[in-house]
Image (cartoon, helix red, strand yellow):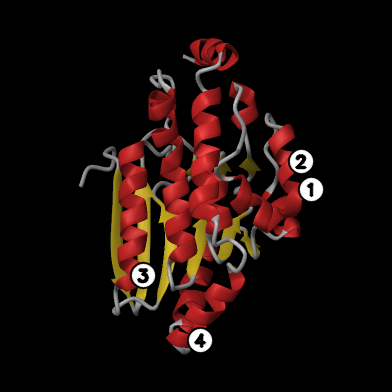
Amino acid sequence: MSEQQPYVKQTIENQVGYIEFFHPAHNSLPGDVLAKLAETITEAGKNDAIKVIVLKSGGDRTFCAGASFNELININDEATGKVFFSGFANVINAMRKCPKFIIGRVQGKTVGGGVGLASATDYCMATKFAAVKLSELNIGIGPFVVGPAVQRKLGLSGMSQIAMDANTFYSAEWALNKGLFTQVFESTEALDEAVEIFSEKLCNYNPEAMAEMKKMFWKGTEDWDQLLAERAAISGTLVLSEFTKETLKRFK
């Protein structure tokens, strides 16, 4: 498998299912990779050989740069826009519905939709390099699809802060204090060791108890299939606005 080809892959070690995604453009996620990621998470939830899931990305520096910019600039109608923004909605909903705990392993910066993925994990561990940014307002849209997941972790105050201050990276320490991250480590090596120890420890617990706890943690989100679809439609409309089209041309 070429290091420069996008992929989603799963490995199982000591009953922990490691789901890894990669894209050469700073782990940005086009629609096909998002669809594969949602499918892989759903299937892992049904796999009896897996008791706990770890979500991670390839590469050393960036956890996830958010939605694929190349796909974003080619949206020309509302239907295509809604499908595009539904990609992250489908992954977040797959994570929400998965009966197994999902541990996030965030090794570096995460932007936009990537913050949504980190927020949708059940327990997220990171390095000190894992600054977060919600950059959507920069291009004339907003973090509508990932907003519910981010708000669930950061609270409305924290979410609105980084959503409005769309040019600023907020430190891993800030994300730790707000509750997005549970622990922050000095290096990727220390992070990986801690993720492995914690995940394998969870595998010793009653799967039925963990599944019931997961339901409890996500109580009140039962409407997210509809809510996130509605949010995707809002983004799909805004991306066609004159403001956003002009902004995207400058980025291009």
Q: CA distance from mark 2 to mark 1?
A: 6 Å
Which disc number belongs to residue 149? none
Decide which of tag 2 and tag 3 comes sooner along the chain.
3
Q: Is residue 104 visible?
A: yes
Q: Are marks 1 and 4 in contact (CB under 8 Å)?
A: no
Q: Is residue 107 visible?
A: no
Q: Amino acid at mark 4?
A: Ala
Q: Which residue is mark 1?
A: 157
Q: Which residue is mark 3?
A: 45
Q: Is residue 94 above or below residue 242?
A: below
Q: CA distance from mark 1 to mark 4?
A: 32 Å
Which residue is depicted at the point 64% across and 28% down? 137
Q: Residues within 10 Å of mark 4 (few under 14, many from 20)?
A: few
Q: Are marks 2 and 1 in contact (CB under 8 Å)?
A: yes
Residue 15 or 4: which is nearer the viewer? 15
Which disc number belongs to residue 209? 4
Question: In x, y percent, where is residue 213?
Answer: 56, 79
Q: CA distance from mark 4 to mark 2?
A: 36 Å
Q: CA distance from mark 2 to mark 3?
A: 34 Å
Q: Circle 1 — which element?
A: helix
Judged by depth in the image, the label closer to the viewer, 4 or 2, is: 4
Question: In x, y percent, where is residue 129?
Answer: 61, 48
Q: Amino acid at mark 3?
A: Gly
